[in-house]
Amino acid sequence: MASLLHVAVGVAAGRLWAGRPSWRAALAWSALSMLPDADVLAFVVGIPYAAPFGHRGASHSLAFALACGLAVGLVGRRARLGALVAAVVASHPLLDALTDGGLGVALLWPLSDQRVFAPWRPIPVAPIGAGFLSVRGLRVALAELLPSLPLLVFGLWPSRPGRVGRGQKK
Ligand SMILES: [Zn+2]
């Protein structure tokens, strides 16, 4: 997990979608960006980490991201929304593949169960759950802050006066 970077992607996606800084959009898109990590529930129900549906397994595949985008795009009949959903969900395993711990991500599931990493892994892996609220968790958050800054600035920078965002009325 690269937590702060996932949130930063969500904040930037919220800005892209809303057309202006929006805390509601930032929260919603950040939750979507973190969605693949819902697979930590696998630990609770006893699914092993390395299993296809274990942590960083199927939910960390490009197929899962594509399925999320297709579902949202088809149900909502909005291709642009579906494409953004797919891109945000796909960003999660791609960022996780840049971390230095864990088993890697099942990027090509269901074609392959193999867990993969990027050739360059500059992001320290974040502790899972309450372990994130530790000295190690703080160190990881600080290491992720620098690469997150451009996304956070883009997502939170105030709109120019008079500019109307999506869903706003003049
Ligand atoms: Zn993850």
Image (cartoon, rainbow, N blue to C red):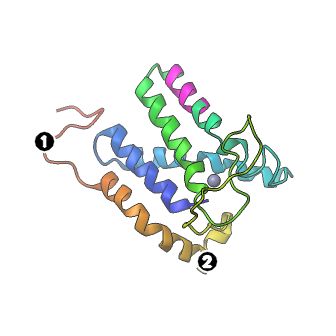
x and y percent of residue 120 in the render? 57, 62
Disc 1 residue lies near ligand 1 with CB under 8 A? no
Disc 2 residue lies near ligand 1 with CB under 8 A? no
The residue depicted at 23 percent of the width and 53 percent of the height is 158
Is 99 situated left or right of 162 in this image? right
**Relative to 134, is 155 above or below?**
above
x and y percent of residue 45 in the render? 84, 50
The residue depicted at 37 percent of the width and 55 percent of the height is 151
Q: Outermost residue toward the left?
A: 162
Q: What residue type is labelled 2?
A: Arg
x and y percent of residue 107 in the render? 66, 44
- Name the mark nearer the viewer: 2 or 1: 2
* Residue for badge 2: 136
| Quadrant in which the N terminus appears | bottom right
Predominant secondary structure, magenta span? helix
**Residue 130 magenta-highlighted:** no
Total marks in image: 2
Residue 43 is drawn in which quadrant?
bottom right
Q: What residue type is labelled 1?
A: Gly
Which of pointers 2 and 1 lies earlier in the amino acid sequence? Answer: 2
x and y percent of residue 4 in the render? 50, 61
Start and end of the magenta stretch?
A: 67-74
**Residue 68 magenta-highlighted:** yes
* Residue for badge 1: 162
| Quadrant in which the C terminus appears | top left
